Amino acid sequence: LFRSPHPPQTHGSAVDLDVMVKAGISAPRDDDDDGQDGKKKKQDFYPELPGDLTWPLQDRLQVKKRIRDSGTPLGFPDLVFDAPALVEDFYDIAYEMSTGLQDMMSIVQEAARRMKNEDWMRFQEIPITNVHMDDQAVHGNYFATKEPTWRPLLQRPKKTKTTCVFLHIGTEPPSPQLGDFLTKLGWYGVCIGPRAPPPGNEDAVQYVDIDPADAREQEKIDALMAPRGGLVPKPVHFALTYVNVAFNARDDSRVLDPYDEQYAEKVRLRAEEDNKELKEKERRAKRLEEREERKRQQEKDKQEQRQGDARPVSRGSAASSRISSKDSNASDDEAGDQTWVVKSAFEKTPLPEPAPKCATGHGKVGITRGERIRRRLRALRNSLAVAINRLADDGSLVIFWPGIMCHPVLAFIAGSLRKLFQRVHIMTPDGAKTWDIYILASGFKREKAEDQTPGLGGLELKSFFESGLRTDTLDDVMLWTLAQFEEEEELSVGVSGRGIVASYTELWKSFADKFKSLAMEMGVFLLTGGGNDMMRLPPPPAPKKKAAPAKKEAKEAKKADSKDERSSSNPSSGRGVSADPSAADKTAKQEAGNKQPEKKEEPPA
C-alpha cells in the first residue's frame, strides 16, 4: 500500500534518517548487530521461556513447568485468596517498575533450576508455614529501625507512668513471645478471637471470645464499633492495635478439588463419614440427656414423696414412657439423618460445586467461588474495621499479611491506609528464620478518618467496609483490588529509597536475600549472574603474603655505612687526613646540619 519514493538502501550504507522518519520506515537491523559494548548479542530463540540465555533448554523448560504448576508467576501458590489471575496482572505491572522484584525472581528461577523435587517443595512450603518465629526481635528492634516513633510508643507505659492498653484481633491469638514482650514493657491488652491467648499473662491480657470470620457473630463485631463498645466498652480507643488474620494451609486439606475426576465419589464418601460421625455424636448426646433426665426424675420423685400430695411415680412407668418416646422419635431421627447429609456439605465441611472446566481468566461474575475464601475476606474485613475504629489519634496499627509477597490485595490495603496514616511501611525481617510480612502504619489521623468529605477522609474505606457487597454470597477478591493507575501509583511509593518509608522494592530485595539464605541452608548456593558458574562456590581467600623483613636490620646497616663515612672524613682519627682542612670543616658542618635525631626503637612486645 505504501511505496517509498527513495531507492532501497542496504544496511550499513549512508541513509537519510530524516526522510526515513517522515516516511515511517525503520532502519533494518541484522541479527548479528553489535551491542553497546561492541559485542555481538546472542539471539534468544525461546523468548517465552524464563531464565538466562546461557542455560540449557532442558533447564529452562523445567523452570517454566515448576513456576506454572504453582499457579502464579512467582513460583508460590496463592493459597489464601486463590486468585492467580489477579496475581499475574499485578505481577506484570510490578515487574516492569521494581528492580527488587526482578532480583527476587532471578533467585527463584535459579532455585527452580538447581533444586531437586523434594528441595523445591520445601523451598515453596517454608515461606508459608514459618511465620511468627521471632516476634520479640521483630516487634522490638526491627520495627524501631524502620519507624522512628515505634520505640517511644513501646516505652510509653514506663516513661509516662500511665495505663496503656493494646488491642489484638484476628483469627489467631498473639504468640507467647509477643505477649511476654508487651506485658514486660508495662502494656495491658485485650485479645479478640476464636482462640484464647497462651497461658501466662491472664492478669494483664483480657480475652473476648468472638470469631471475626463467623457470620453468626457479626452482631457482636458490629457492637464493638458502636458507641458503647459492645463486649469491650473500655477503653474507648487504643494506642496500639494488631490485626493477625492468619490461615493454616493444612486446614484446607478437607476441601475437595472440583476438577478431580473422582469428585462425585469423594463427595459421597465424605458424606457417609460425616453421617457416621454425626450419629456417634447424637448417641453420646442422647446418653447424656438420658442421664440428666434420670437425675431430674429422681429429684422430682423424692420431692413428690416428701409432699405426699400425689401418688408416687414408679420407675417402671417412667422407663416405659421414655421407651415410648424413643419409638415415636425413631422415624424423626431417620429422616434427620438423610437431611443432615445435605446440610453437612454446606455447613460443616464446605464442599464446592463442580466448576466448569472452561472457566478461565477473571470469569463473568468474579473469581471467588465457595465459602472458604469469602470466610477469609470476612475475617479480614471485620478485623481491619474494628482495629481502625478503635485506634486512638496518633496511634499505630500493625497488620500481619497472610498471603504471598506480591499480591494486589496487599497493595489495596496499604494504599487505602496511606490516606489515614502519616507513614505506611511494607516490610519483612531479615534472615530466613521467620517469613512474616507486616504493614506498619504509624501516626493515625483520626480527625481525617472521621471526615465525611469524599476523596479527603476515610469515607471511601468506611463505605467499603459497610457495603452490601461484603456479604457471604457477593464478596469477591476482585473487589479488593485497585485500578491499574492506582497500583502503579502505590508501587511508586518509596521507590527512590531516599525516604524512611519501607517500599515494595525493599520488601522484594529482602525476600531475594531470604531465598538465598534458605537455599544455602538446604545446601544449594544461589548467586547472581548466568552460566554454569552460578553454582560455583566462592573462591577461597588468597593466602597471606609473608611479612616483609624487619626494618631494624636495614637501619643498622645504614647506620654502619654512615659511621664509616664519618670516620674516614674525620681528621682526628689519624686515617685519611684531608689535604684541605677548610674543605673538611665544610663537609663536617654539612653532615652536622643534615644529621637528624635517631628514633628510639621500642622493644618488640
Image: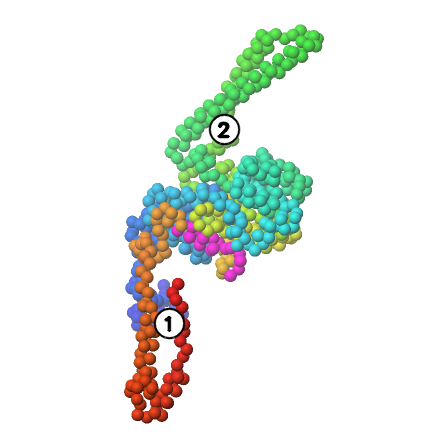
Classify mark 2: helix, strand or loop.
Answer: helix
Residue at (51, 31) in percent of width and height: 347
Q: Magenta residues?
A: 498-516
Above-or-below relation of 526 to 332: below
Classify mark 1: helix, strand or loop.
Answer: helix
Q: Nearer the viewer, residue 32 or 141?
A: 141
Q: Which residue is mark 1?
A: 17
Residue at (42, 27) in percent of width and height: 269
Query: Which quadrant of the rendered structure holds the C terminus?
Result: bottom left
Residue at (46, 36) in percent of width and height: 251
Residue 25 percent location from the top left of the image: 37, 67
Q: Which residue is mark 2?
A: 344
Q: Amino acid at mark 2?
A: Ser
Residue 16 percent location from the top left of the image: 36, 73
Residue 599 percent location from the top left of the image: 41, 74
Q: Is residue 92 visible?
A: no
**Was residue 78 drawn as part of the magenta stretch in this picture?**
no
Q: CA distance from mark 2 to mark 1?
A: 74 Å
Which numbered disc, 2 or 1, marks the residue that appears first in the sequence? 1
Within 10 Å of disc 2 (Cα), the crowding (few <14, some 14-19, many 20+) is some
Within 10 Å of disc 1 (Cα), the crowding (few <14, some 14-19, many 20+) is few
- Colour option used: rainbow
Q: Amino acid at mark 1?
A: Leu
Residue 262 percent location from the top left of the image: 38, 32
Q: Nearer the viewer, residue 451 or 192?
A: 192
State if disc 1 and disc 2 touch (CB < 8 Å).
no
